[in-house]
Image (cartoon, grey):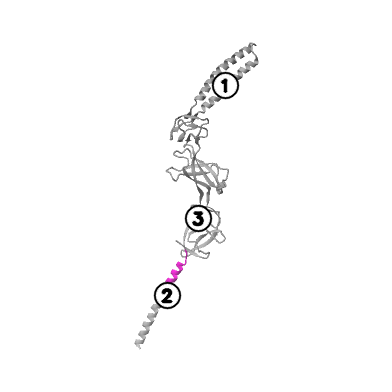
Amino acid sequence: MKKTIIFGVLLFSLFSCGSGGDNETKKEDKTVKNNTILPLVQTSKAKKKSFIHKISIQGSVESTQDILLNTEMSGIIHEVNVSAGDRVKAGQVLVSLDAALINANIQELLSQLDFARYTRDKQVALFEEELGSEFDKKSAENQVSSIESKLNTLKIQQAKMIVKAPFDGSIDQVYAKKGQLAGPQMPLMRLVNTEKTEVVASVSEKHFSNIKKGTKLKINFPNYEIAPIQSVVSSVGSFIEPTNRTFTIRAKTTSKTNLMPNMLAELEIIDFQVDSGMVVPSKSILKNAKNEDYLWTLTLAKNGSYNVKQVFIKKLKVYQGEALIEENENILEGNLIIAGGARGITKKDLVRIK
């Protein structure tokens, strides 16, 4: 009998221990399960701040003074006074042509002019003494005027036998050679002023309303060790290129040295700016099946979890990971917003913050 009672107690104790362990395990499992079903999200805060939007456009450097020099008169090149790379001043003689024939004609006309003036003076004196006719006087005066006109024409031609620099600059390349026959269609050399340059770029027509004369921009030179230049748009084209739907803008380089025509440049243009607006991370903005923009805001619940609220918004501009949104009464400065891990969340969910 005693043995039976002892066996029964031991058996009850064994079952009691086993039953308690199972309850604890189930309780633990339930806690882990409750924790793991809460989505883990990353958060950010809505901020009231200034917002800018920039566009980046490739352009190239152009000189406002970059020309091919030609001669207006045909003739044999008598002298080339410069070489490639030389710096020249405005008015400096670069090339001279053989003007021997023109000079001889000028000397001949000067001699004729002396005699014509002598004849005119005599005819005027005779006319004043009523010994000569008015016709003879007018003929002599006309002869002087005619010779003076021819002489003036020859002197202009003589001046055009010399090619001078129209502005200060550098000789980029020389094509003329001594003894060569030069003509109006033959370039003699290229003259470039690298101290007066500008950047020219083609901009998509969708930005036309946001870029005006005076719009601020920054000019970078990605392929060169040249400091960026702060400038403004100096001119905006009034024509849309039909082949690529772009218009042209120009910006002065503020007399920046070491720039050469056709150098690659990159323009950063602020095409939109507000002093104060509601800004959220751009990755926090999602779209529904109706293509509407929305985001999730968070409010503290219990046990460190958070309630979610879907807020529909209007996105105005996006730049470098930030989005400017229209003012919304459901989003205030400092509100917690889900910035990552929001996929699959529903309005009834509780979430945890990572």
Instruction: Find out whether the residues at labels 2 and 1 contact each other: C-beta distance under 8 Å.
Output: no
Residue 46 vs residue 122, the one in the foreground = 122
Front label number (2 vs 3): 3
Earlier along the polypeptide chain: callout 2 or callout 3? 2
Counting from the top left corner in percent of width and height, residue 162 is at 49, 28
- Image quadrant occupied by the C terminus: bottom left
Q: Is residue 24 above or below residue 323?
A: below
The residue located at (55%, 24%) in the rendering is: 152
Q: Is residue 275 above or below residue 37?
A: above
Q: Main secondary structure of the magenta part?
A: helix
Residue named by callout 1: 148
Does the magenta portion include 25? yes
Q: SS at mark 2?
A: helix
Q: SS at mark 3?
A: helix
Front label number (1 vs 3): 1
Residue 244 vs residue 31, the one in the foreground = 244
The residue located at (57%, 21%) in the rendering is: 148
Q: Is residue 92 visible?
A: no
